[in-house]
Image: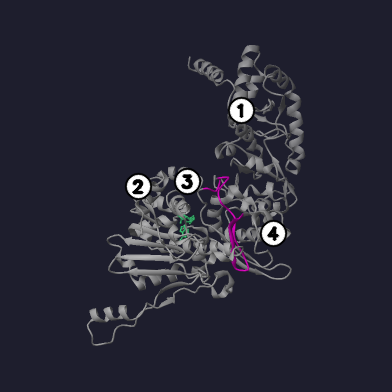
């Protein structure tokens, strides 16, 4: 049967070794999930075969009754899971059971801390899959034959889950895959019918494929000794199998018949996630278009949320037949964390990715699912929302640029830090902001900076603090870019308070204005002198409306790139055109008064340079010539000490 020349011993990819080690040590309190993972793979294998049979009926080899069978042997301490799905050839086996193909895997593994509790959460995000077999088994064998290939092209894979595995060619008349787990010492409890049934009903009831197990024999009532009766039953009759799960596609059942636990387990099956989802919505749409969707919001961001090539999208079915994983055309990018299934009655069974790309039905379903997702997000409880925002807020912020039509809906989901909340936590919604607006205020004020502290302590906030006007503090990398697409919310426009001339509108009283004019007049000379000495650095010097406590601040033009965006571009190696900021001064500040009184020109210039550099620093900008700044400051310090 075995040809030795065909037997190869191969090493696992380094990442697999790491993953195996980690899995065995972090899943110990949740061992039973190995069965869910293997059943999930078996069910996927059946889905893939059924899909292929749509265009090639022969591939079923006359055996179209797809199912999964679980067997066990108490004496040998084995559990096996058999499917008659698509199966694997030698190349598939080596690729799928020896390497991990997901992009970003090594980055993910670098994040592991060695703390088993934390790591087990991370591994949940990664998805455990086939390798979880080694949590309960110290040897795993796979017998498989790909649909459509001849019996002598079967493959036998074995591994003890350490560094290597073997593959050899074997005869296998049966199509599909059998996975045999040789249970570790101490894990014998899994070679038990009741135990296995209870795990199936807990985790895999929703699998639409029948899962079979040997029929429970009634307890022996005869006088014979137990030994004999066992012998008899084995000899007399072939074992009878029965279906041990519900075996109907979960989404075809009606909502009120499905328990929360079933929804949660179904989520884990389709998402390969380890944790429960935070929310889901299950809808049947009838009328012009007919489809059923079941959408989930995960609890935690997957490790590859920002990987361009990461898989995303829904599992697509047409009339209950599985068509493809990762159908990305039904969800916008900024909702790429959403998981779920879509079962359409209108799309053709032979639908391909190319057809999906330019299809009216797809477009309109995408529109409806987007709205449904946004509504579901909106309905999250406050505590859930906080966590949701931490996990996915940054991705949602891509929304206004991508989805103009839903801009306002998306913006309504945003949360920011603000001068009102006093913490870096992003908890203020735009509606909260609108509610707290001052009488006469008709703008939404915000500032964006490199980090929270730079935003929260910016001199630009001074006038707003004094007037009690709330300012949103933005410090995520994406913010300034995002605000380029978000001009207003519920009729109120956004104003970046660090840019351009500050129009305070009705917040500024007549008295303020009069005072301002007076100060401007009396400072004409100072402004002129400053402009002369700082000519190389500033485009203009002006008397400020916004400062109350600081001597000066820098303002960029209304259409210039903000400091945050500028730094991102520069860090990415882009040369930015030089645009000089305006320096605004607060002439009533003691330092400015002192400067105004300085008659010695070279000293005036020294001090002016310091004022400029400090204004830049307090905004989180970097100085062109930091050493010169330090030298000037030190000179001043020496004078005071001396
Ligand atoms: P995932 O299912 O997340 O891709 P796994 O490690 O569980 O990761 O499985 C790796 C791959 O091995 C699967 O994607 C599939 O191609 C293949 N595979 C696993 N189990 C089976 C099976 N029972 N039948 C056919 N292919 C399988």
Verify whether residue 506 appears in magenta.
Answer: no
Give the label, 3 or 2, closer to the camera.
2
Q: Position of residue 106 (x, y in %)?
A: 46, 43
The answer to whether the residue labelled 1 contacts the one labelled 4, judged by CB atoms less than 8 Å apart, is no
Tell which tag, 1 or 4, sits nearer the viewer.
4
Q: Which residue is mark 2?
A: 163
- In the shown orientation, is residue 484 left or right of residue 267? right
Q: Earlier in the sequence, mark 2 or mark 1?
A: 2
N-terminal of the two: label 3 or label 2?
3
Q: Which is more N-terminal, label 1 or label 3?
A: 3
Q: CA distance from mark 4 to mark 3?
A: 32 Å
Q: Which mark is residue 616?
A: 1
Disc number lying in front (4 or 2): 2
Q: Which residue is mark 3?
A: 105
Query: Label 4, on which residue?
Result: 362
Instruction: Give the Cα separation between the discs numbered 4 and 2.
Output: 46 Å
The answer to the question of whether label 3 and label 1 lie on touching residues, with beta carbons closer than 8 A, is: no
N-terminal-most mark, 4 or 2: 2
């Amino acid at each position: 049967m075995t040809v030795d020349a065909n037997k190869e011993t191969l090493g696992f990819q380094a990442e697999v070794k790491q993953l195996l080690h980690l899995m065995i040590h972090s899943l110990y309190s949740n061992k039973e999930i190995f069965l869910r993972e293997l059943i999930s793979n078996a069910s996927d294998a059946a889905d893939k075969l059924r899909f292929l049979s749509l265009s090639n009926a022969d591939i079923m080899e006359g055996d179209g009754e797809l199912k999964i069978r679980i067997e066990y042997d108490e004496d040998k301490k084995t559990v096996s899971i058999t499917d008659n799905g698509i199966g694997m050839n030698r190349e598939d086996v080596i690729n799928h059971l020896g390497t991990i193909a997901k992009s970003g895997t090594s980055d993910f593994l670098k994040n592991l801390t060695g703390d088993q509790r934390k790591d087990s959460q991370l591994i949940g995000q990664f998805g455990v899959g086939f390798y979880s077999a080694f949590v309960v088994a110290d040897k795993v064998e796979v017998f498989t034959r790909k649909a459509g290939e001849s019996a002598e092209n079967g493959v036998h894979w074995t591994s003890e889950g350490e560094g290597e595995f073997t593959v050899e060619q074997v005869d296998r008349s049966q199509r599909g895959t059998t996975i045999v787990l040789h249970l570790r010492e101490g894990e014998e409890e899994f070679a038990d019918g009741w135990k296995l049934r209870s795990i199936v009903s807990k985790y895999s009831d929703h699998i639409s494929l029948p899962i079979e197990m040997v029929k429970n024999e009634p307890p022996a009532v005869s006088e014979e000794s137990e030994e004999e009766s066992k012998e008899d039953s084995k000899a007399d009759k072939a074992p009878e199998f029965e279906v041990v799960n519900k075996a109907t596609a979960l989404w075809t059942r009606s909502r009120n018949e499905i328990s929360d636990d079933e929804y949660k387990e179904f989520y884990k099956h389709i998402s390969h996630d380890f944790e429960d989802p935070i929310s889901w919505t299950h809808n049947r749409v009838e009328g012009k278009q007919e489809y059923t969707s079941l959408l989930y919001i995960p609890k935690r961001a997957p490790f590859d949320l920002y990987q361009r090539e990461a898989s995303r999208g829904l599992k697509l079915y047409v009339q209950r037949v599985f068509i493809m994983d990762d159908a990305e055309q039904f969800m916008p990018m900024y909702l790429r964390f959403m998981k779920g299934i879509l079962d359409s009655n209108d799309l053709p069974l032979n639908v391909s990715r190319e057809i999906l790309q330019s299809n009216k039905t797809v477009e309109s379903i995408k529109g409806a699912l987007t709205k449904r997702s946004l509504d579901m997000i909106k309905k999250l409880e406050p505590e859930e929302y906080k966590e949701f925002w931490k996990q996915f807020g940054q991705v949602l912020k891509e929304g206004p640029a991508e989805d103009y039509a839903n801009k306002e809906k998306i913006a309504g989901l945003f949360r920011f830090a603000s001068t009102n909340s006093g913490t870096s936590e992003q908890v203020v919604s735009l509606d909260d902001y609108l509610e707290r607006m001052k009488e006469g205020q008709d703008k939404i004020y915000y500032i964006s900076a490199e980090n929270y502290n730079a935003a929260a302590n910016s001199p630009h906030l001074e006038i707003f603090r004094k007037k009690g006007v709330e300012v949103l503090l933005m410090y995520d990398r994406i913010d300034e870019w995002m605000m380029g697409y978000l001009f207003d919310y519920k009729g109120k426009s956004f104003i970046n308070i660090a840019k351009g001339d500050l129009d305070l509108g009705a917040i500024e009283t007549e008295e303020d204005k009069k005072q301002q004019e007076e100060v401007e007049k009396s400072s004409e000379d100072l402004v002129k002198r400053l402009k002369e000495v700082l000519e190389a650095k500033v485009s203009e010097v002006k008397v400020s409306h916004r400062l109350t406590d600081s001597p000066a601040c820098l303002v960029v033009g209304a259409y210039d790139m903000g400091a945050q965006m500028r730094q991102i571009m520069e860090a990415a190696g882009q040369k930015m055109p030089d645009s000089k900021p305006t320096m605004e001064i607060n002439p009533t500040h003691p330092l400015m008064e002192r400067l105004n009184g300085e008659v010695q020109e070279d000293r005036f210039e020294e001090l002016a340079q310091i004022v400029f550099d400090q204004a830049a620093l307090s905004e989180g900008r970097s100085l062109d010539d930091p050493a010169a700044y330090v030298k000037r400051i030190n000179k001043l310090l020496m004078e005071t000490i001396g």
